[in-house]
């Protein structure tokens, strides 16, 4: 019988495996990637969801590689984030998304819905009442129960 220290490679594999298991556990926040529109193939978007202390879904949107809004429409001045509950026909404006010079941006919003569609569009105003046809990103998000 051989006694001694374990092989360092074996220890590394065990620690790596433990990290993967812990990262995929209940404390991980669900992340959903958004799909770029045809006009904006380089655009990247990721939605992370969690539940706040009131039982609402908190969504955190991160975007990267967005073009200037004017590149999609001469009248566009900003981006707007829209959500709609699954099964509904109407989108709700949840906020204006400002994109920095490095073409990244973030927005955090709350909704009572657990599963919803998300769109990012280029708009003339942050207070647009309905999404324009200037689609940048779209997808579906859901919170983990």
Image (cartoon, rainbow, N blue to C red):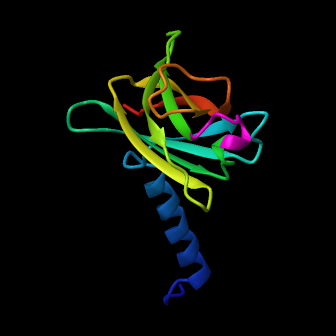
Chief secondary structure of the magenta span? loop
Q: How many marks?
A: 0
Range of the magenta residues? 70-77
- Between 14 and 103, the residue placed more toward the observer is 103
Q: Nearer the viewer, residue 102 or 56?
A: 102
Q: Quadrant of residue 111?
A: top left
- Report if residue 114 lies within the magenta region: no
For residue 79, side relative to residue 144 (left or right): right
Residue lying furthest front: 75
Q: Quadrant of residue 118?
A: top right
Residue 59 lies, with reference to residue 142, above or below; the image says: below
Tell me if residue 7 can be seen.
Answer: no
**Spot occupied by residue 31 in the image (x, y as percentages of width and height):** 52, 43
Q: Nearer the viewer, residue 135 or 25?
A: 135
What percent of the width, then of the height, locates residue 71?
Answer: 73, 43
Instruction: Say which residue appears at 72% left-offset and 37% top-offset.
Output: 72
The reply to whether residue 31 is visible in this rendering is yes
Residue at horizontal 53%, vertical 9%?
89
Residue 22, percent from left and from top: 43, 56
- Residue at (44, 45) in percent of width and height: 107
Reply yes or no: does residue 76 show up in magenta.
Answer: yes
């Amino acid at each position: 019988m051989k006694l001694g220290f374990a092989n360092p490679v074996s220890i590394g594999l065990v620690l790596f495996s433990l990290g993967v298991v812990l990262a995929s556990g209940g404390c991980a926040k669900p992340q959903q990637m958004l799909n770029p529109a045809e006009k904006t193939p380089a655009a990247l978007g990721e939605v992370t969801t969690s539940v706040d202390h009131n039982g609402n879904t908190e969504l955190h949107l991160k975007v990267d590689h967005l073009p200037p809004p004017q590149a999609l429409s001469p009248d566009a001045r900003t981006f707007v984030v829209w959500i709609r509950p699954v099964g509904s026909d109407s989108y709700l404006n949840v906020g204006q998304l400002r994109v920095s010079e490095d073409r990244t941006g973030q927005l955090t919003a709350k909704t009572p819905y657990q599963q919803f569609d998300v769109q990012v569009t280029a708009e003339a105003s942050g207070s647009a009442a309905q999404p324009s046809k200037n689609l940048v990103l779209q997808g579906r998000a859901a919170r983990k129960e």
